[in-house]
Each structure stands twice: as C-alpha cells, then as structure tokens.
Amino acid sequence: MAGEIHARLSGVTRVYPAVAGNPPVHALGPIDLELRRGEFFSIVGPSGCGKSTCMDVLAGLSPPSEGEVAFEGKPVKGNVPDGVGAVFQEDASFPWLTVSDNVAFGLRRQGVDGAEIAKRVAYALGFMGLRDFAQAYPAQLSGGMRQRVCIARTLVLQPRLILLDEPFGALDAQTRLLMGDELLRLWRETGATVLLITHALDEATMLSDRIGAMSARPGRFLETIETGWPRDRDSSMLEGETFGHITGRLWQMLRAESKAAMGYGSEPGQADREAG
C-alpha cells in the first residue's frame, strides 16, 4: 500500500521526568512511524509499552523528548493541529448535556454558524444511529451508544486524521465487533486517516490496513504487518483463515513482550531477537 505521507514521527522518544523521588521513565522509542493518507493503522503491544504516549505525542498533547512530529508536512508543537480529532477509552460525554448538545459542543466553541452546526449535528446523529436519541442524556444510553456520541462529536469537526485510544475497551466482545463495523463505515465515508490504539489483536486485525506491533517499555516497533484486506470489509473477516494467521503472527511477536511487561519470563525485545 503506497500513498502520500499524512503524519510522521521521526526518531521520537518520550521520557517522563523524575517525580517525588522516583526515577525518570523512558516510555517510548526511539520510533519512526509514517501514516499514509487515508489508511487505517493500528498499534498493538503489551500494557505500559507507550502506545497511548505515541498517540499523545502525535496529537500534540505531549511533547517528544527527542525527535520530530509532523502532520500534513507541518511540525506539531504544543497544540492539537487543526484537522486532528481524538476519541479516548473513557466516556467523555458531558452528563448535563443532551446527545445533540454533546455533539455540537466543539462546533460551538469554535464559533461555527448555527445553521452549519445544525446541519453537521443532524448528519452525525443520523450516521451514528443516534437520531432518535438526540434529546436523551448520556445516563439514559448504553456504553456503546455513549461511545457513538463521542465519535459523533469528533466526526462533526470533520477531522482529516482521527486518533482512537482504546475507544471500545469497556465494551463486551459482541458490541466491540459491531462498533468496529461502524468505525469502518465511518472511515470509508470520510476518507480520513485513522490511527487506533488497542490491546485486542482481533480488533486490530479486522480493522486495519497495517498493524504496528510494539515492544515492552520503552516501546518501539518490532514489525509492521500489512493485512491486505479490501477497503470494503467488516466483521465477517473473522471467519477467514487469513484472519487467524495474522492474529497468530501478532501473538507470536507479543507473547514474550507481554511477559516482559508483567515482570517475568522474558526481556523486552526477546521476540525480535529470536526472530532474527
């Protein structure tokens, strides 16, 4: 899969400084990552390996200790760039606002015209299957529906790069698959570039054009796998032999890294050394 580079991390590391007598934490890198315009890229790896740190650095939410970050050819420094939207694992809906007002929140802060807000919100609610719940409050919705609200709130901002940090982590397996289908539909409809952080190997395999497997902390990319899936795909991919082959390959790489992250068995990078 070839294409224009949409976002890039070059030689990026992230070291968190010493706090309250604890030593500095080397969380990430050095890593290089190039996201191609319009692709769906997932990052998997053991807990604490720096996956979320990677996303925060790319979004401008956390500065790199070393290296450079760019989006659409411009340096990312200190602020979330225009054209970038993020959805996190935690329910970020505002409980005191209706679904409609939650989705409109970012547009109102940007000072978008009222008619344009109404048009975008109506589209997003319809696209995410929330039209009948426009006047409901988050407490009246299921967990999956609240995540749809958060995705819709990002969608109305019309981002060209969508960053997703475990957005379905709190959902049951069946709901995650259905939400994955919705996410693929959103990706195809908008043409946005998507970066997904996930612990779920099956989720990454189903959704992605490419998957970056990360080592235990400090996280670095062990390998990037191209799935070869067609753009028009959905959860029926789970039934195929290729799906099992890809998830098996990911687990083969990450098993030793996950044990190292838990403090027993292997050292970080062992899977990479054994493969070499």
Image: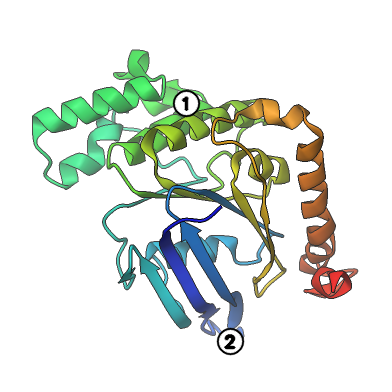
Query: Residue 110's x, y, as percent?
Result: 16, 47
Rendering quarter of residue 236:
top right
Residues packed near mark 2 inside 10 Å, few (<14), some (14 to 19) or many (20 plus): few
Q: In the displayed structure, does residue 33 sit left or right of residue 138?
A: right
In contact (CB < 8 Å): disc 2 and disc 1: no
Q: In the displayed structure, does residue 30 sit left or right of residue 132?
A: right
Residues packed near mark 1 inside 10 Å, few (<14), some (14 to 19) or many (20 plus): some
Q: Is residue 63 visible?
A: no
Q: Amino acid at mark 1?
A: Met
89, above or below 264, in the image? above
Spatial CA distance of label 2 from label 1 is 43 Å
Query: Residue 101's x, y, as percent?
Result: 25, 30
Residue closest to the eye, 238 or 126: 238
Residue closest to the eye, 99 or 227: 227
Reading the image, the residue beneath label 2 is 21
Q: Is residue 134 visible?
A: yes
Reading the image, the residue beneath label 1 is 145
Query: Residue 155's x, y, as percent?
Result: 34, 38
Q: Residue at x 14, y 32 (%)?
A: 116
Q: Amino acid at mark 2?
A: Gly
Give the residue furthest to the front. 2
8, above or below 168, in the image? below
Q: Residue at x 34, y 70 (%)?
A: 76
Q: Give the mark, 2 or 1, whose residue is nearer the N terminus.
A: 2
Q: Nearer the viewer, mark 2 or mark 1?
A: 1
